[in-house]
Amino acid sequence: MSQQGNINMTSPLRIVLASGGTGGHLFPASALAEELKAQGHEVILASDKRGMAYQNKLTAMPIYCVPAATVYSGGLFALPARILTLLWSIVYSLVLMLRLRPAIIIGFGGYPSFGPVMAGLLMRKPVLVHEQNAVLGRANRLAVKLGASLATSFPNTAGVPARAAARMRKTGNPLRADVLSTTQISYRSPTRSQSFDLLVFGGSQGAQIFSTVVPKAIALLPENKRKDLHLVQQVSKDHMADVLNTYGEMKVSSEIRDFFDDMPRRLRHAHLVICRGGASTISEICALGVPSIIVPLPGSLDQDQANNARDLAATGAAELILQKQFNAEDLADLLNKWLDDRARFETMSANARRLAEPEAAVRLARYAYCLAQHLPIQIDEPSSFLQGGR
């Protein structure tokens, strides 16, 4: 169902979304697709082979598989082949866009978006790119330099060319319907009479350090505090037996799985989460007002996860710990201190909620519609001017 504050459209449009093949790119695209479809638009998705695997988890829409490659991995010997793949992606996408004739192309970053976005720019179609992270990604950066408009999820997004400021709006990161529905339930402040619910997850990349550090930190807590814990943790299958045995020996109430298909419900139930700093994770914990300890995934060229978490840490909504500083002793000290001051979690929750953008999909849909119809950009309030033209 479309959210409140929708623009008053005069005609439905055909819109192509172009997205990288990971959940971090695809889920915001799917959330926007749901909003656009509710407004009567026709929505089509272009992604790569990885994106096809998410088909059953996305809003129902036609999906086209486009060639994709990155020039930032594989070494020098693989570079010529990757460049040829990128060129072929543009040619393939040009043919596809000529056939589909969309009113606008919206890119969500990642190299599978490169071909359709470049095709749109070459055809002089309106092109809008959405950046989920607090650092502008390489595919989006090139598109913006070549004239695409930009929607950001965070204030002060790094890497945006100065000349693109007039074509940039902050919309926030679109959230899935199951997350938005869960935001209607308020944060449940911890009390002494109930268990303290700790949720630990690391996504597909890098839950291993949590499987090592968190059990050791829990073992260092005083026994009375361990008894108060209920721990829900994502653990890879390779480490599951060890983690289960460790918590069992400590008699800590725990639920261990390698994947949670009901993460919004888990987030809503948690008093505190320990997690990575992916853009969707940050958007969801802000929308739900969940206090957090964020350990950004290291090694990325742009340190995007650390940048994603900076505003939460600066406003007191989260504790930001770099992985090289993430150890059992310091984590145990932090948890021990926080468990003695449970009132802090209500404050952290309120701080996180102040950074939330629950209307992100609506705002992004308005932005796209205005661009497609060559109207003045209006994303913050219902665009009544659309009924009467410019």
Image (cartoon, helix red, strand yellow):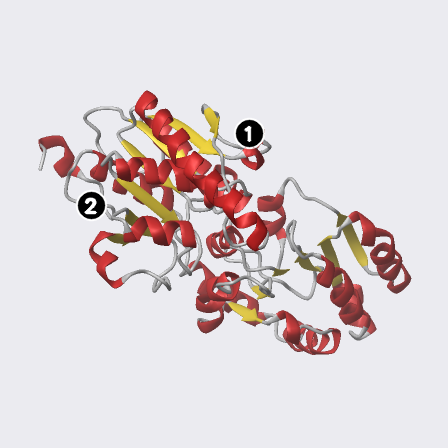
In the rendered image, the vertical position of residue 89 relative to residue 203, given as above or below: above
Secondary-structure class at tag 2 = loop
Report how many numbered discs are placed on residues in the image.
Answer: 2
Residue that appears at 53% across and 40% down = 21
First reached walking from the N terminus: tag 1 or tag 2:
1
Q: Position of residue 119 (x, y in %)?
A: 33, 35
Q: Position of residue 321 (x, y in %)?
A: 59, 72
Q: Amino acid at mark 2?
A: Gln
In the rendered image, the vertical position of residue 308 relative to residue 330, given as above or below: above
In the rendered image, the vertical position of residue 259 relative to residue 188, given as above or below: above
Crowd rating for badge 1 (residues with CA inside 10 Å; few <14, some 14–19, many 20+): some
Foreground residue among 228 and 82: 82
Say whether residue 1 is left or right of residue 5. right
Q: Amino acid at mark 1?
A: Gln
Q: Residue 159: which quarter of the image?
A: bottom left
Crowd rating for badge 2 (residues with CA inside 10 Å; few <14, some 14–19, many 20+): some
Identify the image quadrant of the C terminus: top left
Secondary-structure class at tag 1 = helix
Q: Nearer the viewer, mark 1 or mark 2?
A: 1
Q: Residue 272: which quarter of the image?
A: bottom right
Residue that appears at 67% across and 43% down = 260
Label 1, on which residue? 55
Foreground residue among 228 and 323: 323
Q: Can you see residue 11?
A: yes
Q: Can you see residue 176?
A: no
Foreground residue among 235 and 177: 235
Label 1 – label 2 distance at C-alpha: 32 Å
Identify the image quadrant of the N terminus: top left
Residue that appears at 34% across and 30% down = 94
Q: Position of residue 362 (x, y in %)?
A: 33, 41
Q: Find residue 378 and name its label.
A: 2
Q: Position of residue 45 (x, y in %)?
A: 43, 30
